[in-house]
Amino acid sequence: AHSLGRHWDFLYSRVDPARPTPDPNKVWCDRQREATATGVSQALAQLQARGHEKGTGKVAVLGGGYEVDLKPLLEQFAEVHVVDLTDKPFAVVERQNADDPNLGKLRFIQTDLSGVDPLVQGFEVERLRSERDQGHGLDPEGIKGYMGGLGEMSPSVLESGAYKMVVAPVLTESMPYGPLVTDLEARRDQDNAAAGVDDSQDRRSTWKHVSSYLPDSFYFDPQVRMGFERLFLHQSQELERLLEPGGVGVTSFWTRPDERQAEYAPTEGGLHRLGDNTVSESTLKAFFSPFTHEQVDEVKIYGPDKAPTVRVYTLAKD
């Protein structure tokens, strides 16, 4: 969990107002924030139609609290719980909302939301570090084994049925590859320091570094998909568990055209790309099955028609 926390520290640094942010990433964050705001607005309307009284109940924001406009949530609920794996984003959230008269409603909870056993995560981090220290390239087969052996998912420390609303922006960024990305960043930083290169932590260059070791075919591997689908369905179970009856969730997915399916998975039908990962049609349906769901926004972040798209959903628990 500590190494995953370092990864989230890196993600938060993209939107920290105290640091310059590369233009492509700023566009990415701003558009995502707008899309999430639409989802929150729609969810609030649904709650009000169900009898929500202003200033009552609690809302949880799972990860990325700095990319969510918290002002309407602070106004509408008695408590706003911002949950993240590392505590550094909390300072950003406080700065963003420093002038809000309802700032006292904010609560910060630092915990791992992935559901993966910390021991399993820790063993994977050590394996990756050992590969790095021995000078070997990352072994995709080892990472496949990690994804295929995640074990049983565990619920988070958050209280069941405690929330009128749960906001989980860009859910697929729960980052099942968190230990991998963290380790790659550490190695890149080490290499840059040795070469005297001052390289800011740019997410795009990090993923370029990742993809140099993990070809697109990696994400179609059955073990990798099985692991991601388990993480994905666990998040659905957590959203259902945390919401009180009549509560509403907000979540969003990165999606993109799956042009490589015929090449890498010719016998598989109906695969969907969520971020880099693949899920089956049945898994996507299972994610939504506990809820009455509605797609409320679709935002192309940048680039041509085939660029990634964020789709935003409300999830009502009846």
Image (cartoon, rainbow, N blue to C red):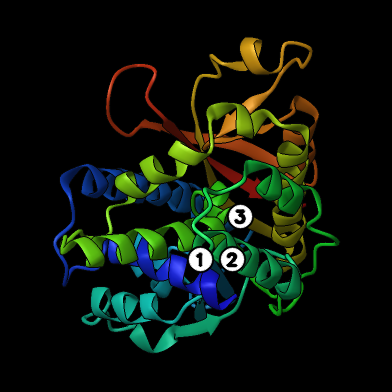
Task: Report the Cα–Cα distance between label 1 and label 2.
Answer: 5 Å
**Is residue 209 or residue 53 the one in the foreground?**
209
Of marks 2 and 3, the one in the foreground: 2
Q: CA distance from mark 3 to mark 1?
A: 43 Å
Few, some or many C-alpha atoms within 10 Å of disc 3 (few <14, some 14-19, many ≥20)?
Answer: many
The residue indicated by pointer 1 is 133
> Please, what is the three-letter code of the amino acid marked with disc 2?
Ser
User: Image check: 304 left or right of 72?
Assistant: left
- Residue at 14% of width from left, 61% of height from top? 20
Q: Are marks 1 and 2 in contact (CB under 8 Å)?
A: yes
Quarter of the image where one finds residue 269: top right
Q: Position of residue 106 (x, y in %)?
A: 43, 83
**Is residue 41 positioned above or below 242 on the image?**
above
The residue singled out by tag 2 in the image is: 130
From the viewer's side, name the closer residue of 157 and 202.
202
Identified by mark 1, the residue type is Asp
Q: Is residue 172 left or right of residue 302?
A: right
User: What kind of residue is marked 3?
Assistant: Gly
Res. 49 visible in picture: no
Q: Quadrant of the N terminus?
A: bottom right
Q: Which dot marks residue 208?
A: none
Q: Which residue is mark 3?
A: 249
Label 2 and label 3: CA atoms lie apart by: 40 Å
* Label 2: how many Cα within 10 Å (few below 14, some 14–19, many 20+): few
Work out whether mark 3 precedes mark 1 in sequence or the reverse, and give the earlier one.
Answer: 1
Q: Mark 3 or mark 1: which is in front?
A: 1
